Each structure stands twice: as structure tokens, then as C-alpha cells.
Image (cartoon, rainbow, N blue to C red):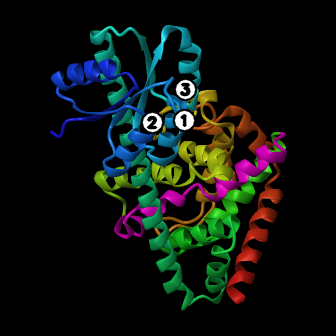
Amino acid sequence: MEPHRLLIVDDEPNIRELLATKLSYMGYECQTADSADRALSLLERQPVHLVLSDIMMPGLSGIDLLQRIVRTYPDVAVMMLTAAADTHMAVHAMKLGAYDYVTKPFNLEELSVHVEKALERRQLLMENRAHHRLLEQRVTEQTQEIREHLRLERQRREELHHTLNLLEQSYHATIDALIMALDYRDNETQGHTQRVSVYTLELARALGVSGSDLETIKRGAILHDIGKIGVSDTILRKPEKLTEQEWVEMKKHVQYGYEMLKDIAFLQDAAKIVLHHHERYDGMGYPTGVSDDTILFGARIFVVADTFDAMTSERPYRKALPYDQVRAEINRCSGSQFDPLVVDTFLAVPKYRWGELRQTVDEELALRKAR
């Protein structure tokens, strides 16, 4: 394994040699510099893993050097060396990005521990950055796949062609395009996203939700199944009952959806609803098995609306169920699958109102198809 490279910067030669000798003995590859300018020159030729720099030096100070390194070499860790009287400057250096500081005169054994910890922290930060880059790469790849799917579908749907153009212009158009792409893949539930979103908003308003909270619930409802983009077509479009292994894979869409949305600033709260939308009030849901009030309120509202739409819609494997039967089943599952407060609110909404909402969505979908 390649040894860690250290750069020791101090205008006092005795200190440079002392530290270089000790740290070289410990297996580190050490270079020394008598000034910040010399240190920057060495860094241009060969970046190092850790810089140990005195604070008070002629010319550029250790603080100046720290700021240059943080700005130009973000992967280099910096530890400050300071006299006991200058610890306030060391604390200031920590705020500017230094990993640690040690005071003179040194306890060499203690210094070696500080060096090891600084290098360990640097390694953790490097791994974390690599992890974020990997996630960004995955999101980029998924976005490219979605755009290719939209390009192919555009040949058959003028409406989708229009949506693809909007996709390049705004976040909101991106959401529309993602949902339409999912509906085309999961064609047994076309219109489900629009209906369940409308039903969820009806329940949320009846429960007193308003303002930004209502908008968050709306976005969570619209995007609840966006993670299915990451599920194989052979599973998503399978007409028969899924096997146990296929069902395990299908369940992953909840986590996929959350990972896709959680780093988008205006969708972070909605992403949590996506994560919770298959949890149960009794804790028997997935992916985490949370229960009761630990499930986001928006997700507790959504799951009732989602169940209502699923049971009142046609499926390849069954007919739509009568309203009264659906109403009785939702009431039966109050306190187990569903939040009792949400169920009571659902039961208080008259039957004709649900019919009006469904008709509104159906008419909107018919208009889109006619364009």
C-alpha cells in the first residue's frame, strides 16, 4: 500500500527535521518546506495527503497557506502547528478548514496520534465524496435512460413530444415527464397517478392541511411510484402474480424513488412521503416498518387514497370493486393498515364527491389523448 505523503512546513529547521524524522520512522513519506511559498511550489509538483504547517511564519502565514490549500487542493488535509499562546489562531484555522492543531513544544507520541486521526478523517471524507459522485453518476444514467424512453415514445404521442420539450425547460415539466414515462411502462395503472393525487389532496384539505404542506403532499402523491423506473419491465409489466423474489425486487421502488428525489431541494419533503407510502399504521409495512405517528402524515393520508383508487379501478386480474365494499374494507383496516383519523375523514366524504373527482381526471386524460 502506498505510504501517506506528508509535507512539513515550518521556518525553524530544527522543528522540520524533528518532525520529519519521527514521522518517517512511522512509515510516512515526508517532505519539508521552510515557507508557505515553498510549500505551494512543492504542492504544484506533487500533491500530498497531509500538510503540517506552522501558523506564524515570515511571508505568507500558515493561515494564508491553509486558505490556498482548501481552495486549490480540497483533497489535502491540513494540520496546524502553533505555540501555546496562539491557540485562538488555531481555532480560527479549524473554522477555515484545518483538520486539527497541535501546540508546541510537541509530545511526539501525541502528535503521531493526531496525524493518524487527521489521515483517517481525510479518508472518510474522500470515501464520502466518492459515494456522492457515484450517486450523481447513477442519477445521470437514469436521467439519460428516461430521456431516451421519452424520445422513442414521442414518435407515437404528440403530447409526449410536447412534454419532452418542457422537460428541458423546468423542474415541473421534468416531474410530468417522469410520471408519464412510468405510466407508459406500467400500463395497467394509467391514470392512477392523476386520480390518487386528486383523492389525496381532497383528504388532506378535509384534514385541515394547507399552504406549503399541501403542496408537499401533492408532489409526494404525484411522485409516489417514480422509483418503478428502476424496476425491470419483466416484473413491472408481468400480467401474472409476482414470485416472492420478484416481489422483493418490486418493493425496492420505494427506496429507488426516495434516492432519486431526496437531493432535489424543492422535492426533499416529498421524497420522504415517497419513502413512507407503503408503510402501515401497525408497523407491518415497508421499507422500514415504522408505525403510528412516526409515519409522515402526508403518507398516512396518501395510503388511504391509494387503496381507494386501487380497489375501485379495473385490473387485468379483477374487476373494480363496488364503492360500498371498498368503503367497508377501508373501515375494517382502520388502526391496522390505516390511520384511524384519516379513515374517519375519508368515510365522511360523500360518495358523489369521489365520483366527481374521478370524472374530472378521466375527462382530463381523454382531452390529452385527443390532442
Q: Decide which of 232, 81 is in the foreground and name it.
A: 81
Give how far apart the Cα atoms at labels 3 and 1 are.
Answer: 10 Å
Give, as a single range, the part of the protein colored magenta.
208-237
Label 3 neighbour load within 10 Å: few <14, some 14-19, many 20+: many
| Residue 268 horizontal side relative to residue 198, left or right | left
What residue is disc 1 on?
Answer: 64
- The secondary structure type at the circle numbered 1 is helix
x, y (%) of residue 363?
A: 76, 76
Badge 3 or badge 1: first in the primary sequence:
1
Q: Circle 3 sits on which residue?
A: 93
Which residue is more in the foreground, 25 or 280? 25
Q: Residue at x 37, y 21 (%)?
A: 12
First in sequence, mark 3 or 2: give its number: 2
Residues at badges 2 and 1 in contact (C-beta under 8 Å)?
yes
Which residue is farthest bottom?
155
Residue located beneath label 2 in the image: 36
Viewer-nearest residue: 343 or 170: 170
Q: Is residue 238 visible?
A: no
Residue 139's place in the image compared with 272, above or below, is below
